[in-house]
Amino acid sequence: MNGTRTLPTRPSDHGRKYSTPMAPPFMVSAPGKVIVFGEHAVVHGKAAMAAAISLRSYLHVTTLSKSHRTIRLCFPDIGLDHTWNIDELPWDVFGKVLKKPKYYDMVTSLDEKLVEAMRPAIEEVAPEEQGDKRRILQSAASAFLYLYLSLQQATTPAAIWVLRSTLPTSAGLGSSASVCVCIAAALLKQIHVLSGPHPDQPDEEVETQLERINRWAFVGELCIHGNPSGVDNTVSTRGKAVLFKRTDYTRPPQATPINTFPELPLLLVNTKQPRSTSTEVAKVGALKKKYPDVTEKTLDSIDQVTMSAYKLITSDSFDPKSEHNIEHLGDLFRMNHGLLVSLGVSHPKLERVRELVDYADIGWTKLTGAGGGGCAITLLKDNVDKQRIEKLQEDFEDAGYEEYKTTLGGDGVGILYPAVLKNGSEEKGGEEINLQKFLNAQGADDIERLAGVGIREKRPEWKFWRLSDAN
Ligand SMILES: Nc1ncnc2c1ncn2[C@@H]1O[C@H](COP(=O)(O)OP(=O)(O)OP(=O)(O)O)[C@@H](O)[C@H]1O
Ligand SMILES: C[C@@](O)(CCO)CC(=O)[O-]
């Protein structure tokens, strides 16, 4: 069954009085991330340091009445609009063939039998598309379907899922992880196994909810990436900044919150060179197979760079305004980038960013995320002349690159339940973000204006699972 364009309406779209006990439309949002140190090495059990950014994905879920039996996925950023008939999905594979995992289980690999059973439903997604475009659409659809079949029942109500992101897709800023966190959180919310979020929730309970969401987001990442370390979904779920390490994939990773993550003067530039994380990760895997000793040593060196940066920024004497400290961190940026180049995951367009920054002599640059294109981050030197930054920004524009303004270390996954904002008015009811409004938003600015989390203004209706020491 393919994309129907008309949107079924609920009995009452205007007020919030529903004539049936249907769940109201709700939203989930999760941030992207920058990896400050340690990408790729982290896939091989070394440490990585990453921070959430203010660019985010937003998922809107509308439950339909019992007369509908469809699940529609509408992900306009990537051109996906597909509808499945719920009763035609392979629900029977679980139970008959496989043991259905519990919502609290830790799933660390995909079950080939379920992947196989899902295949016909995935094959019918975007059959008219070819190559990379098809892969992008089908991988997003598989992440959703795998989680949907794992967490829901055949009796699940019909629904429309619309996802829009202010993050660039496939650019190293964790777009896939933020999508997977949104999907995992929304599915868990729908089956009523998430408590909160509410302000006085004890830390232990907050941890349980975050862990639950993160585990399933990781399964979504397995569908998109193949071999994720879990750092992206962990930062996207928890927000702020973490030092992450995973040596044993059958156990939860170590994720040490960095509560004192400094406000660093960073430029974030997208080369707009498309690439896929799974390809870049596979490249390093192949290199390690070919040259095990040398590659392992390179990965160990990245680990040392990451740990050295961690020690530096968590030391009591670290001051982001200190020229000496920033130079130290900058040197570590340069070393980390050089090691990534030697692993073969840079790209001429990323090297061009580094070159332009080096010529301007205003900071230190490294690729961020999987590389092969995508984004670079530049740590700016102290007291850099404004004109030199402006000239550099012109050079970036001339090269066809895009710079993003973002802040580091914001909130992780959040929920807006129901999808209603008061928007400064005390009027009863407030303003509902209905499906059509969400679909009509034009681009990132409009999405943020309509539903944005903590960027333009504090929106108290959005709720987050916050740990007491991370506020
Ligand atoms: N806005 C979006 N809507 C729907 N699916 C998306 C969206 N953004 C990303 N995706 C899914 O995530 C995939 C991109 O994941 P990929 O890991 O290659 O890039 P990334 O997560 O942006 O980069 P990195 O892993 O280096 O941070 C896409 O192929 C698509 O399946
Ligand atoms: C390249 C990589 O290290 C980071 C991608 O953002 C892959 C991963 O950790 O899953």
Image (spheres, rainbow, N blue to C red):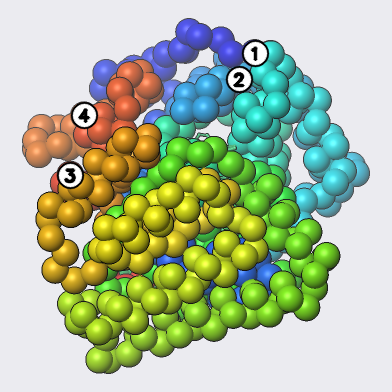
**Residue holding disc 2:** 82
Q: Badge 4 local density, few (<14 within 10 Å), some, or many (20+)? A: some
Q: Using the image, tell me which numbered label, if any, was put on residue 456.
A: 3
The answer for how far apart the CA atoms under marks 3 and 1 are is: 37 Å
**Residue holding disc 4:** 431
Labelled pair 2, 1 in contact (Cβ < 8 Å): yes
Residue 460, percent from left and from top: 21, 50
- Within the image, what quadrant is residue 13 found in? top left
**Residue 150 versus residue 87 in the image, above or below:** below
Residue type for callout 3: Arg
Residue type for callout 2: His
Report the mark closest to the observer, 3 or 2. Answer: 3
Question: Residue sitting at 40 percent across and 51 percent down?
Answer: 353
**Residue 125 versus residue 49 in the image, above or below:** above
Depth check: give the residue in front, 408 or 256.
408
Which numbered disc, 2 or 1, marks the residue that appears first in the sequence? 1
